[in-house]
Image (cartoon, helix red, strand yellow):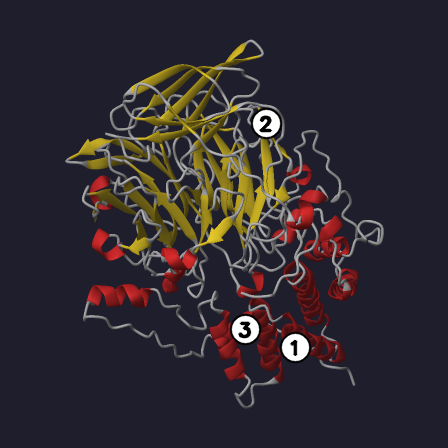
Amino acid sequence: MKKKTLVISIAGVVAFLLLTSVTYVCVKNYRNGNETFLQYRAGLKKIYHKDNEFVPEAQLAFYDSLELVPYLGEQKAMAVQFYKAMTLLKLGQEKQSIGILMALAARADSIQDLRFSMEVKQKLALAYVRLGERNNCVSNHSSGSCIFPIAGSGVYMDPSASLKGIELYRQVLQMNPADLESKWMLNIAYMTIGEYPGSVPSNLLIPGLDKDTCSWKMKPFEDFSHELGLNNFRSQAGGSIVEDFNNDGYLDIVTSSWDLDESMHYFKNNADGTFSDVSKTSGLEAIKGGLNIIQADYNNDGFMDILVLRGAWLGQFGTQPNTLLKNNGDGTFTDVTIESGLLSFHPTQTATWADFNNDGWLDLFIGNETTSMGYPHPSELYINNQDGTFREVAQLAGCAKTGFMKGVTSGDYNKDGWPDIFISCRDGQKFLLKNKGAESNIPQFEDVTHEAGLDHELTFTFPTWFWDYNNDGWPDIFVCGYQFRGSLGITAAAEALNLPMPQKTSTMYLYRNNHDGTFTDVSKDMGLQRPVFSMGSNFGDLDNDGWPDMYLGTGNPDFASLVPNRLFRNIEGRQFADVTSSARVGNLQKGHGVAFADVDNDGDQDIFVEVGGAYKGDAYYNSFYVNPGQNDNNWISVQLEGSRSNRCAIGAHITVGFRENGVKRNVYMDVNSGGSFGGNPFRKEIGIGRAAIIDELTIQWPTTGIVQTFKNIAPRQFLKIREGSDQPEKVSISRLEFKHNNGNMNRISCIPGK
C-alpha cells in the first residue's frame, strides 16, 4: 500500500491559529489620579498578544495552549510544533528548539514528506548554528567574535554545534542545490570552525569570502568594548549616542534597547582611558525601551538632553509614548515628557531636531509609522515655546505626512537659510519637504519630491541623511534600500556568486544635489548600486582626508540574516570602496545605533555600534571599534556654541579652507548628529588631509545668518567657538589610551545573560 504523504500548508495553519485568541492584561499604575500619567505609564507596558510577533513569549503560550486541544489532527499538531520550535529560537532557547525540530524531522522522514522534511532540517541546521554562536561568541566572547571573514580568535573553541549544522545543511542542499540561504549559512559555519574554504565541498563553496579584493585598504580597527566595560551585557536592537553629557570635554556613551524590559545605559568617560557605568545614579536605568535615541539641547541651558523613541515595527501594538529626558546638569536626567507637551501615542523610531522657524530654539519633527491607512499615524512637528514646552503644528505647517516612516533628516538643501526635511519610508514613498519660511512663528513646508526628481523609483527604504559627500558646498542625500524577499543570506550569497538578485531587491541610493533644487541619482557611478539592507548607520571621516565615509549596520529579524555590517570609504568624492574586510569591522550580528566620534581624543574617529536583533535570541554585545590611525593626515575639532542661535548650533555651516599639495580645497560640514539611527557628537571632527595650516575657518550661524571667519588656524587642536566671539577658544583635552586586558586580545569569558 502506498504511504500517504503529509504536506504542511503554512498558510492554512496560520489561518487556523488566527481563529484562537489569548487574553492579556495591561496593568495600570495609579498615581494621584492623574489620568495623563496613567496613560503614559500604560503606554510603556509590553502588550502580550499572540499577534504581536515581537513578543514571542505570548506566541509560545499560545502554541502551548494549542497542544492541549483534543483532536487537533496530525497535520495541525506538527505545524504547531514547528512554530513552537521557531518561537523558542526567538527566545534564545536553542536546545529546546533543536529537540522539537529533531522529532519533527524524524516524523517527516517516516511519512516520506520530503518538502516538510527539508524545511524542518533547514531550520534545525539554523538552530545548531545559533547554538554554536551562544556556546562561543556569547559564552566565550573574543574581540574577533563574529567578525567577517571569521578568523583568528573568532574561530570557535567548541565546534560541535557548527559541525551538526554543517551536516544538516549538506543534506538540505543535496535535496535543493539552488537554496542560496543554506549555501551561505553552510559557508559561514565552515568559517566558524576554521575549515573554510578547504573543507567546503566544491559544489557548495562560495569562493572568495575570505579574500579582500578591494584595492583600497584601511588599517584594522580593534574592538575595545569589553576592556572598557561597554559590553558587560547583551542587548536587543537599540540606539546609541556619543556625546559630552556632563560638559567635562570628554565624550560619554548612552545606549537603549527597544525591549520594554531593558534599561538604558549611560557610560561616563572618566578622562583617564576608562568608563564608569552610571546608569543607576543618572536615573537612566529606570528608563525602559527605545529603539532609537537622539540628543539635543532643547531648552538652551548648555546640557544635552535625550529623546527616546518607541513603538517602531509594532503596528497596532506600537502606540507607545516617546520620552523626553532633561539633562539636569548634575549627572542626572528627569523625564519631562508630559510637562513638555510631547506626550503622544504613535509607533516610531525616527525624528530630527532643527530650528525650523529660526527663532533660536530647537523644534522637533517626528516621523511616525502608518502600516494601515485605516489606522493612520501622521508625522508630528513640535514647535518650541521657549519655556520648556512644545506645541504640535504639523497640519498648520503642511508637514503632517502619512507613511511607514523609517528615517527622517533635516538640512538646508537649497541654501535659503531654512532647514528642510527628507523622509524615507518602507512603503515605497520618499518626501522632500521644502521649508518656505515661517508665518506666525510656524514654518511652512511644501512637498517638492517630484520637482526635485526624488520620486523616480518606489522602493522600500530605511536610514537616510543629508551630507556633502563631494565637498561642493551643497547637501546631498543618502538613503539605503530595505526591500527584499527571504533572509539576507540569500542576497549575500547571490552577490558573492555574481548571480541575479531576487526580484524587487533594493540597493543604496545616493542623490547628488544639482544646485538648482533638483537631485541626480549617482549611486551606480559611485559604486553604491548594491544591496546592503542597513538599519543603524552613520557617517564620518575615518582617515581625515576630508571626505565623509559611512558605516552601515545590516540585518532584519530573520535569524538566517547573518551578514556583515559594511564600511565604505569615500575616495575623493568620486566613488565609495567597500573596506569592511581590511578594517575588520564586519560584525555578522545585527547592527543598530551607530556613532562616529573621536572618543580617545587622538584626532581620528572611532566607531561605536549598539548591536542586537529584534528578539532575545538575537541579543548581542556592543562593539567599540577604535581607530588605529590610518595615516598622518591633519585635523581640527570644533565645538560651536550659539547665543542667538540654538545653544548646540544645530544647522550651523562650517567651511574649512586650506591648501593640500598646492591645491586649494574646502571641506564643508553642517552641525547635526549624523544619520537617522545613531548619534554622533555635536563636536565636529574635520579632516584636512596633508594641509599644514588652515587658511580660513568659516562659521555661518543658523538663526542670524552671521558669518564668522578665522584665519591661519593651526591644525591638530580642539577649538570652541561662540557665536559672535572674536577668537576661537583653545580647549585642553588629554589624549586617552585604551588598553587590552593583559596587553593582548585574548578571549574573554563572559557570563551569558540578557
Circle 2 SS class: strand
> According to the image, label 3 marks what residue?
12
Label 1 crowd bin: few (<14), some (14–19), many (20+), radius 10 Å: some
Image-quadrant location for residue 638: top left
Label 3 crowd bin: few (<14), some (14–19), many (20+), radius 10 Å: few
Of residues 741 and 200, which is closer to you in this image?
Answer: 741
Could you say where residue 248 lies in the image, as x and y percent from the top left?
40, 40
> According to the image, label 2 marks what residue?
575
Q: Are marks 3 and 1 in contact (CB under 8 Å)?
A: no
Circle 3 SS class: helix
Of residues 704 and 186, which is closer to you in this image?
Answer: 704
Could you say where residue 344 lies in the image, as x and y percent from the top left?
27, 56
Question: Mark 2 or mark 1: which comes first in sequence?
Answer: 1
Which amino acid type is shown beneath numbered disc 3?
Answer: Gly
User: From the viewer's perspective, is residue 696 above or below residue 69?
Assistant: above
> According to the image, label 1 marks what residue?
100
Could you say where residue 33 lies in the image, as x and y percent from the top left?
18, 71
Q: Is residue 565 left or right of residue 290?
A: right
Question: Mark 3 or mark 1: which comes first in sequence?
Answer: 3
